[in-house]
Image (tube, rainbow, N blue to C red):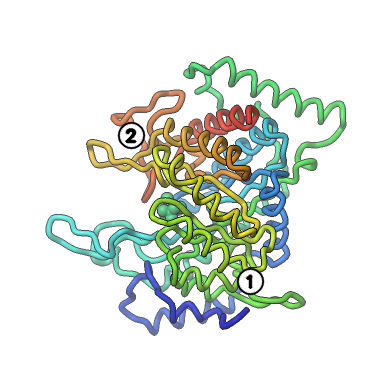
């Protein structure tokens, strides 16, 4: 790799990094991180790359989802189990209707750093640093909480390790049973005008599982190996650099803090330090693309990040918004096709659809999310490209952050259980319903 090293990003345009009071303390934490064991292995990373390559060819489908921002406080067994459960159930609905294996990628075990639109926040005349995720500082609006603490880098690494350890244990031990619809909470179904259709789909999933297990004698957990890959926004470059390693008998450098690091929209510009960092690692990469980027910018990204046209290397995660996708996506698809390089297309229908309520809360409408996704399927088909995956902000719990869905949650209902530290997530029922509706669209496509 020409002129690249794990530190070459430092001479590019570095944005969205915290300002620490004690730079020496950051250096010493980074040195400790650099010798701690890796969180993932290079062979897992390569296995995921192979799966992303098949998703790009339309042979698989990727379901990426989890919190907008994980928090240290929610690194609990209940929250992790609930997240795995909803991802597993959604993936079964998708497998069944799309007739494709589904690769599950969590936004977890490291999704602790957030980009912000401003460096500072002012309330009642007091100005403090913005909250940048638990990897950096804490949410409470006090000078102490908002001061970036270098030790949070180690705390984030440790919680990522705890999360992955628990996930690996669950996967080894029968967790796949949660595939079975008798474990699903389907109370919401009756509240929907699509109740009959949802019931039919769930019954048909249950029937095919029964068929496989009783007649064919195979345990579904074995057919569709229940693995989960991890992903997070590779935002905090000191943290990412410290976990960038070479491994025996493989070429090049791997970021072993996660399987699939992604670059956010705010740091994907030309000349960005984040793109410079990402270009040199061997992991598959995600990059958010959409509003504010020209088709030529996106094509340029493809050339920089995948110069050899390696399959499975690059996922472009488009996030335009339901109102803009029809105008914005096709020129991007054409510009990328013209590069001749393979990419995996994933639709993030969350980040272009964030709205403020009258009371100043952030929300997203279930109907906008669904609309962007449905349009994405159609636009890819019309342009001869393949939508190979979806990307959601969701939780397995009963939160009230997005409006709509079968229960018709409205703005007044948001206060009941609004827990997100940053962006609004689909709750358990909304996420499962979304999978049932994507399934319908995918089947029709
Ligand atoms: C996110 O995924 O939480 C995020 C900040 O997205 P984007 O970079 O697309 O705005
Ligand atoms: Co978000």
Assign a secondary structure to mark 2.
helix
Mark 1 to mark 2: distance in Å? 41 Å
Name the residue that disc number 2 marks: 414
* Number of disc labels: 2
Give the camera-side residue of 260 and 223: 260
Give the camera-side residue of 119 and 319: 319
- Tell me: is circle 2 under 8 Å from ligand 2: no
Q: Position of residue 67 (x, y in %)?
A: 47, 48
Count residues near mark 1 (Cα–Cα under 10 Å), then give few for <14, some for 14-19, many for 20+: many
Q: Is residue 278 left or right of residue 131?
A: right
Tell me if residue 178 can be seen: no
Name the residue that disc number 1 marks: 254
| N-terminal-most mark, 1 or 2 | 1
Q: Position of residue 165 (x, y in %)?
A: 63, 58
In which quadrant will I find the N terminus? Answer: bottom right
Dot label at residue 309: none
Residue at 55%, 41% (x, y): give it: 82
Frontmost of labels 1 and 2 is 1
Residue at 44%, 51% (x, y): give it: 290
Q: In the orientation shown, which residue stands out farthest toward the right?
A: 216
Q: In which quarter of the image is residue 214?
A: top right
- Tell me: is circle 1 under 8 Å from ligand 1: no
Tell me if residue 404 can be seen: yes
């Amino acid at each position: 790799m020409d002129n690249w090293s794990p530190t070459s990003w430092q001479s590019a345009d570095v944005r969205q990094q915290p300002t620490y009071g004690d730079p020496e303390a950051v250096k010493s934490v980074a040195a400790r991180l650099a010798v701690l064991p890796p969180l993932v292995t290079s062979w897992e990373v390569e296995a995921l790359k192979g799966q992303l390559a098949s998703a790009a060819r339309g042979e698989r489908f990727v379901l990426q989802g989890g919190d907008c921002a994980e928090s240290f406080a929610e690194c609990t067994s209940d929250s992790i189990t609930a997240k795995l459960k909803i991802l597993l159930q959604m993936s079964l609905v998708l497998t069944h209707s799309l007739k494709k294996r589904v690769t599950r990628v969590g936004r977890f075990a490291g999704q602790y750093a957030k980009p912000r639109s401003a460096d500072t926040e002012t309330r009642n005349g007091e100005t403090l640093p913005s909250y940048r995720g638990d990897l950096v500082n804490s949410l409470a609006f006090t000078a102490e909480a908002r001061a970036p603490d270098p030790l949070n880098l180690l705390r984030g690494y440790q919680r990522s390790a705890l999360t992955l350890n628990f996930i690996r244990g669950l996967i080894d031990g029968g967790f796949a049973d949660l595939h079975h619809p008798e474990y699903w909470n389907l109370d919401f179904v009756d509240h929907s005008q699509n109740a009959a259709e949802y019931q039919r789909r769930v019954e048909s999933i249950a029937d095919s599982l029964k068929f496989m297990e009783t007649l064919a004698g195979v345990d579904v957990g074995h057919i569709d190996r229940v693995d989960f890959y991890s992903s997070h926004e590779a935002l905090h470059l000191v943290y990412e650099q410290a976990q960038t390693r070479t491994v025996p008998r493989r070429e090049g450098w791997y970021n072993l803090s996660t399987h699939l690091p992604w670059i956010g929209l705010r740091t994907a510009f030309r000349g960005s330090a984040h793109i410079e960092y990402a270009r040199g690692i061997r992991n598959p990469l995600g990059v958010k693309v959409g509003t504010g980027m020209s088709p030529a910018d996106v094509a340029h990204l493809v050339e920089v990040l995948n110069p050899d046209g390696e399959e499975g290397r690059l996922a472009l995660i488009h996030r335009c918004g339901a109102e803009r996708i029809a105008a914005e996506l096709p020129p991007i698809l054409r510009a990328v096709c013209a590069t001749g390089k393979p990419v995996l297309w994933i639709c993030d229908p969350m980040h272009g659809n964030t709205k403020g309520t009258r009371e100043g809360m952030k929300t997203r409408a279930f109907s906008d999310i669904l609309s962007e996704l449905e349009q994405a399927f159609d636009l890819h088909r019309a342009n001869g490209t393949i939508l190979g995956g979806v990307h959601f902000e969701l939780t397995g719990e009963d939160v009230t952050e997005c409006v709509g869905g079968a229960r018709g949650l409205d703005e007044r209902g948001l206060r009941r259980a609004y827990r997100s530290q940053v962006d609004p997530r689909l709750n358990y029922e909304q996420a499962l319903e979304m999978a049932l509706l994507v399934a319908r669209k995918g089947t029709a496509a």
